[in-house]
Image (spheres, rainbow, N blue to C red):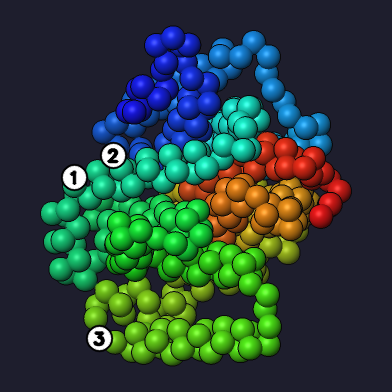
Amino acid sequence: MNLDQSIISSNKGINRESFSIFALYILVYGGYIKLFFPIVSTVVIGLQVAVMILSILLDNKVVIGNKKSVIVLSIMLISIVLMCLGFFYTSDVEIARNRLTIDLSTILYIIIIYIIASRLDVEKLNSLIQKFMRYNIILISLYFVLYIGIFISGLSVGGRLGDVVGNAIWLGRLCSEQIMLILISNNWKLSRVQKLLFILLSAICVFTGSKGPIVVVFVVLTLYFIKITSLSPKKIAITIMISLALLAVFYAISNASSTFIVNRFSLGTMMASGSGYRVSRYTYTIQAIPEHLVMGHGLGSWSKNYWASYGVTSSFNDYPHNILLELLYENGIVVTFIWLLSVFLVWRAFKIVSRERIYVLWLLLIMNVLFGFFSGSIIDGNRGIYYFFAICVALIPKLKKYDLLKEKV
């Protein structure tokens, strides 16, 4: 059955379950499509608007879900609204205006995604997960078909896979999500095709030169390892030995002569502290946070202030590449606490979701939160956090009446 047939039934009109899954995919992953294929950006935006409107019109009754799940969702929305208030005391109005538009549109997306997800049957989540995987594999394949020549020429001169067209980090993120989905949704029992996909996606992750996605995959698979095993002293010892072996391999790689490896994975590059490097960004941000600890420096203020410390006038939207540091710097400790509280309320559901199919979606949320500690801004570049948050908040309360505000096991 093709996509059109699965979405539209000749006798029953629109198949709501299939449409909801398709709508969620377009809303959650539409940003990747726009980044990989800029020429169709307008079409994707139009499609996102269309599915948002249709998702409301398809049901006369809007499902708001469990009241306490609405409270948890509201906590996250309040944190974003408070971020927007930073527009009124920022040092960079132009960037703040752009960020304000992004933040407000994200609030709308979160609400619509939550409404759509609330209608889903948790017993049929496998269909959603499988379709997400299928669509993403198609997306990655099309991307390679169109840009394979550019990729090869870029790698031949020591560049990053995808960097020539500016999408290396996003390609790394998407592939790391797929690695997790393939392994965990199939309980590590892979067919030959899935094994090949795993190898190819892992290779892509490495050649994008994006350290964040590689680290995140390792952390998430470790979480899964903890879930499926009882950590006896012997297993803990084996885990430590494997970790030390990986560190040894990493150290060896860091001393290799390859231009690509030296530029992306060497210890020297990671610890460099000149303007623009991660260490410099983190150091400046940590030192400046106490200056405005309660309210922060204002929406979108980091870029101008950071580069000004080096005597450079910045007119572009830059960020420290760490979501927690940026939250504290721009929005202060109060907003940061509210944001962390909303994430924590979903995080602690681990004990119950680990026994359910929704565990895979929960891990996608955790992956996107971890991505935020390596790249992207608070919302722009990290919208996956908020979209998967909305999905999880909508679905988790359906599991044995799990209470998001009061932990039950």
Instruction: Decide which of tag 3 and tag 1 comes sooner along the chain.
Output: 1
Q: Residue at x 27, y 74 (%)?
A: 260
Q: Quadrant of residue 83?
A: top right
Q: What label sits on residue 257 in the rendered view?
A: 3
Q: Position of residue 164 (x, y in %)?
A: 23, 55
- Left or right: where does residue 404 sit relative to residue 77? right
Q: Which of the two residues, 26 or 401, is positioned nearer the viewer here?
A: 401
Q: Quadrant of the N terminus?
A: top left
SS for callout 2: loop
Q: Secondary structure at mark 3?
A: loop
Residue furthest to the right in view is 406
Contact check, label 2 and label 1, Cβ < 8 Å: yes
Residue of label 2: 37
Dividing the picture into quadrants, the one containing residue 93 is top right
- Residue 26 is marked as none
Q: Between residues 116 and 97, which one lies in front from this camera angle? A: 116
Mark toward the start of the polypeptide (2 vs 3): 2
Q: Position of residue 239 (x, y in %)?
A: 57, 83
Q: Amino acid at mark 2?
A: Phe
Q: Residue at x 58, y 44 (%)?
A: 388
